[in-house]
Structure formats: structure tokens, C-alpha cells
Image (cartoon, helix red, strand yellow):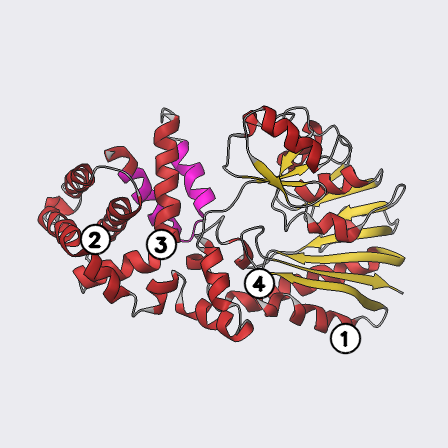
């Protein structure tokens, strides 16, 4: 447990220094390649859990220790231990003992007694502390106050439901390859493998309990992929047809690229700006036995990769706050700042304006985000339509996080 706590503390510290949890784990695993699978899983569970519940954990800690500690690492250690005591099956005596030992190696050991006292005090007064913390909205909803206020303004009827859904563990949803079957057929295969699930659509299946992909029938052969039900709407709305030229302008990791190719025989171009992520697109294409032209480049600078031939369909899955996928990435809500919207809005505007000339007359471009913030969605599309008189809005939908899917926004734009 000592190593588990230590690595979780390091992960949370990296997030507080601006890195995502994904980046933090990549950095942690490089020098710790000897970690067993259970230990790796425990570190991940604790790190995600602390950030999912950080509002209440921090409120409890401030009730126990009114002032921030001089050593940030001890603060992180206490958050980890409080999470373990509340949300895991770890033996309480072991959690406290290892936390105190860990504190002994920080700041010359002068905070060992404090760590021991804080955790013992929490064990004695947990119920009272939790009740007191509920007076604090950040603790009650486990989101930053500015985020709560923004959602309350945007969704006066649904904001609490959205926050609650964003704090849950995400489901594992599958996309059945339309070239090889459908949801009902795959449900039978899952049942034969001892896995229970339910259909969400003609080609979407949600497992009752997540499993490693190696346990999924036909995964290695490309008959099924992991993809949120909400994300599957993108290819369905773009509705490619055989023979069309299609562009996925921000392709990595390739889920939507592959879904489009599963639905029709199209000439696909997949562009990705990040060289480290492009191989993931290639891997997904190879597993699914699909083909696309991959291009490393900036979608906002088409001259560097475009051959001049217009596209019939364009998927513009633009950079965004990712506020709709917080249950999968709980670090997002603590990493984002209100000022992020202006820069992201600029990037979104530049990108869609650069892509619009690449679309053929009568063609369709799907503007997509995994955000639930109106500034990035309906507000962005209203401004786009004002700038482009040859564009019309064929369809728009805002998906809010719920038990079946994450949060997404889609606007289907048609060129006259």
C-alpha cells in the first residue's frame, strides 16, 4: 500500500501542476515498469477517485486542518488517505499506518504526528464532518464553484442532474462493426461468453460491468470497438454514402474515423496534428481491417496537406473544454479555468473557417464537441452562420451526461 499511496500522491501533484491524469500516468509508469497489474490498477483507482471527489475531500481536510499545510505533498497524501478510508475496502489501520510512514519521509518527518492525528480524528468524526461539508457547494457537487454556476445558468432545470452524472463511474459501451453484425447478434455472443449487457441502439451495446477488451468476443478481429454511445452519434449524423470523399479533421484516436468507414465505402482522409497520436489511428484502422489516408498536419492549415479536391462530408471534432466527459476524465474539472473559453473559442473559429472552403457544394460538415458549455456549442454555431451565408443548419443536438452516454454537442451544417 505504501507504493500505491506514494504514486497516487505523485499523480495528483502532477495534475495540480497542469498535467492531465493520462500524462501523469504515462510519466509514472516509465520509471515504474515493474508495477504489478493490481498495484497499477489501485493507483489509477485512487487517483481518479480523489479527483472525482476532490471537492468533498478538500472540504473535510479544511475542517480538520483549517490552514493549508506548508508541504503540498502532505496535503495530497491526506486527500489520498481520506479517499481510501471513505471509498475503498482497504483496512483503515493500514491506510493510516502507511500514510504516517510516508509523512515521515517528507519535511524531515515533522508532520508525522499531524497526519496521524488528522486521520484518527476523521475516523472518529466522519459523519459529522460530512454533514458540515455539505454546506459547501463545491463539496456537495464535487465541481469548482465557477463550473457549478455556469451549469446552473445554462441548464436551470438539469444542472444538478448533469453534475451528479459527471461524478459517476463511466459505463463501458461498445460499437458493433456494422460490416460484421448488429447489437442483437453481439448480445448473444456476450451472453455465451458469460457477459451481461443491453442494447442501446442497432449497433451499440452497454456492458453491465467493464471488462478488459481481450475478453470481448471478436475484439481482436475487429468486430467490435469501445466507444461511448454519445460519440457514436457523430458518424450516424454525418451519414456517409458509398463513393463519397470524407475528411476527419481531428482524427485521433480514430474511433469516429473507423465508424464512418464501417458505415460506407468512402475515400477517407484522416488528419491529426499530434505525431504521437497518429499511430493510434493507424492501429485502430488495422485492427478493423479498414483503410484511410493518414495525414500529419494542422487541420486549420489545409495548404500543408490538402490535395485541392473538395470533400462531400467533413467531421470537425474541434478542441474544447471536454466538459461533457468529466466522468471519464475527472481531472478536467480541476484543470479548466473560466478564461479557457476565449482561447478555445478562437481555436474553434479558426478551425471551422479553414475547413468550410474544403466542403463541396451540397456537402455537409458536422461540428462536434464533447462539451456541455453553450459558448463552445450553440454560441459558436450562431456566429459561424453569421459569417457564412452559404451555410445552413440542418440539425443540432446537445447531449447532456446521463447513464447511457457522455455529454456531446453536434451541429450539422449544409453548404448551399
Residue sitting at 67 percent across and 69 percent down? 378
Quadrant the N terminus occupies = top left
Number of labels in the image equals 4
- Please give left or right for residue 38 compared with residue 20 in the image: left
Q: Which residues are magenta?
A: 5-29
- Viewer can see residue 172: yes
Q: Nearer the viewer, mark 1 or mark 2?
A: 1
Q: Nearer the viewer, mark 4 or mark 2?
A: 4
Vertical placement of 120 versus 361: above or below? above
Where residue 367 sits, quadrant-wise, is bottom right
Mark closest to the chain's N terminus, 1 or 2: 2
SS class, disc 3: loop
Identify residue for label 4: 372
Residue sitting at 36 percent across and 24 percent down? 34
Question: Residue 337: image x %, image y %?
Answer: 46, 65
SS class, disc 1: helix
Q: Nearer the viewer, residue 178 or 284?
A: 178
Amino acid at each position: 500500500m505504501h507504493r500505491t499511496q506514494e504514486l497516487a500522491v505523485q499523480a495528483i501533484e502532477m495534475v495540480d501542476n497542469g498535467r492531465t491524469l493520462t500524462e501523469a500516468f504515462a510519466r509514472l509508469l516509465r520509471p515504474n515498469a515493474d508495477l504489478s497489474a493490481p498495484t497499477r490498477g489501485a493507483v489509477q483507482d485512487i487517483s481518479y477517485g480523489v479527483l472525482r471527489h476532490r471537492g468533498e475531500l478538500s472540504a473535510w481536510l479544511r475542517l480538520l486542518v483549517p490552514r493549508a499545510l506548508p508541504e503540498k505533498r502532505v496535503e495530497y497524501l491526506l486527500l489520498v488517505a481520506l479517499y481510501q478510508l471513505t471509498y475503498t475496502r482497504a483496512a483503515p489501520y493500514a491506510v493510516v499506518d502507511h500514510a504516517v510512514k510516508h509523512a515521515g519521509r517528507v519535511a524531515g518527518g515533522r508532520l508525522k504526528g499531524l497526519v496521524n492525528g488528522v486521520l484518527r480524528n476523521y475516523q472518529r468524526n466522519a459523519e459529522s464532518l460530512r454533514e458540515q461539508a455539505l454546506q459547501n457547494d463545491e463539496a456537495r457537487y464535487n465541481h469548482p464553484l465557477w463550473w457549478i454556476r455556469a451549469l446552473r445558468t445554462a441548464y436551470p432545470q438539469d444542472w444538478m442532474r448533469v453534475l451528479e452524472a459527471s461524478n459517476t463511474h463511466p459505463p463501458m459501451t461498445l460499437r458493433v462493426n456494422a460490416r460484421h453484425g448488429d447489437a442483437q447478434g453481439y448480445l448473444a455472443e456476450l451472453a455465451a461468453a458469460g457477459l451481461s449487457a443491453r442494447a442501446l441502439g442497432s449497433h451499440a451495446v452497454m456492458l453491465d460491468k467493464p471488462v478488459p477488451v481481450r475478453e470481448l468476443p471478436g475484439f481482436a478481429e475487429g468486430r467490435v470497438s469501445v466507444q461511448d454511445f454519445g460519440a457514436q452519434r457523430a458518424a450516424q449524423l454525418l451519414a456517409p454514402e458509398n463513393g463519397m470523399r470524407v475528411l476527419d479533421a481531428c482524427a485521433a484516436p480514430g474511433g469516429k474515423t473507423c465508424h464512418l468507414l464501417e458505415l460506407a465505402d468512402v475515400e477517407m482522409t484522416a488528419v491529426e496534428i499530434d505525431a504521437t497520436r497518429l499511430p493510434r489511428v493507424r492501429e485502430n484502422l488495422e485492427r478493423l481491417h479498414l483503410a484511410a489516408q493518414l495525414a500529419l498536419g494542422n487541420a486549420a492549415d489545409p495548404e500543408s496537406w490538402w490535395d485541392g479536391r473538395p470533400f462531400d462530408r467533413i467531421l470537425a471534432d474541434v478542441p474544447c473544454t471536454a466538459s461533457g466527459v468529466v466522468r471519464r476524465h475527472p481531472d478536467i474539472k480541476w484543470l479548466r479555468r473560466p478564461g479557457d473559453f476565449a482561447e478555445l473559442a478562437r481555436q474553434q473559429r479558426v478551425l471551422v473557417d479553414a475547413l468550410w472552403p474544403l466542403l463541396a457544394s451540397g456537402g455537409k460538415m458536422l461540428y462536434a464537441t464533447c462539451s456541455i458549455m453553450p459558448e463552445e456549442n450553440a454560441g459558436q454555431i450562431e456566429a459561424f452562420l453569421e459569417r457564412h451565408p452559404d451555410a445552413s443548419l440542418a440539425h443540432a443536438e446537445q447531449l447532456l451526461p446521463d447513464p447511457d452516454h457522455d455529454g456531446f454537442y453536434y451541429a450539422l451544417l449544409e453548404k448551399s
